[in-house]
Image (tube, rainbow, N blue to C red):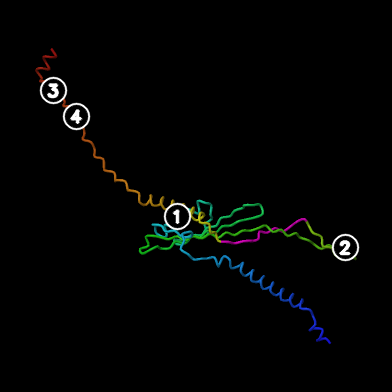
Amino acid sequence: MTAARVRRLPPVWTAAAIAVAAAALCSCGSMAGRGNVKAETEAFGSTTTHSRSFDRTPPDTCEAARRALLSQGFVIVTADPEHVRGRKNFQPEPESHVEIEFSATCAPDGRGGKKAIAFVNALQDRYALKKSSTSASVGVGPIGSLSLPFSSSDDAMVKVASETVTSAPFYDRFFTLLQRYLAADADLVDAPKTAPLLPIEPKPAASAPAASAPLPAASAASSAG
């Protein structure tokens, strides 16, 4: 009797179960696909967005990068002849916070180490203010305890997003500023040296006027009489 009832169940339940399973599979696939959107669109093509070549040595290029970041208010975290990393904070809204970490790596470009290629990357982290109200339990005799919320709250900045900056104009402005500092350093290094000062020769002393010869004694006596 029970087996017959099972065989006579309408196929609606089976169709519903299949639909639920298909929806679950689709949702899982869509979530996995959303996580791979950025990875799938990465082409690893030849681009100058994050790199640029300069006719200076890697230490000179990284020093110019350090000065460029300092001029824009970045706090230098690490700096060495081949790597510079700086950080800058922004407050676009009262309850949001943005932090940019900028990295520049200077590597030799060609033999001899006379040229350098700078690889740059900026990571942007966004934080949002999260509020959580506090509550406490208060005993009220035989009734038990009541949980009463207080007006105070514990506020904390929570990271809500982290993304690499891919804006080409953003990096173009940095490279332009870096080139400006390299040009200023080149002017100081390659400035022509001034000619050494020649010693000043003393002028010849002017000849003293000849003293008048003394008069003869006879002439002096006649003139006295």
Q: Earlier in the sequence, mark 4 or mark 1?
A: 1
Type of the residue with mark 2: Val
Q: In which quadrant of the rendered image does the N terminus lie?
A: bottom right
Q: Is the C-beta separation of discs 4 and 1 under 8 Å?
A: no
Q: Is residue 214 left or right of residue 25?
A: left
Toward the top, the furthest residue is 225
Viewer-side label of 3, 1: 1
Q: Alpha-carbon neighbours of circle 2 within 10 Å: few (<14), some, or many (≥20)?
A: few
Q: Which mark is residue 214?
A: 3
Relative to 45, residue 88 above or below: above
Q: Nearer the viewer, mark 4 or mark 2?
A: 2
Labels 4, 1: front one: 1
Please name the predominant secondary structure of the magenta segment in the image.
strand
Q: Which amino acid lies under the numbered mark 3 shown in the image of this protein?
A: Pro
Can you give x and y, in whole percent of width and height, for residue 130 in the image?
A: 69, 59
Tell me the element at label 4: loop
Residue under circle 2? Answer: 140
Pointer 1: what residue? 64
Q: Which residues are drawn in magenta? A: 151-163
Lower sequence index among marks 4 and 2: 2
Crowding at mark 4 (Cα within 10 Å: few <14, some 14-19, many 20+):
few
Give the percent coordinates (x, y) of residue 66. Answer: 48, 56
Q: Which residue is mark 4?
A: 208
Q: Which amino acid, mark 1? A: Ala
Which marked residue is nearer to the observer: mark 2 or mark 1? 1
CA distance separating discs 4 and 2 = 123 Å
Density class for disc 3 (Cα within 10 Å; few <14, some 14-19, many ≥20) is few
Could you say which quadrant of the image residue 101 lies in?
bottom right
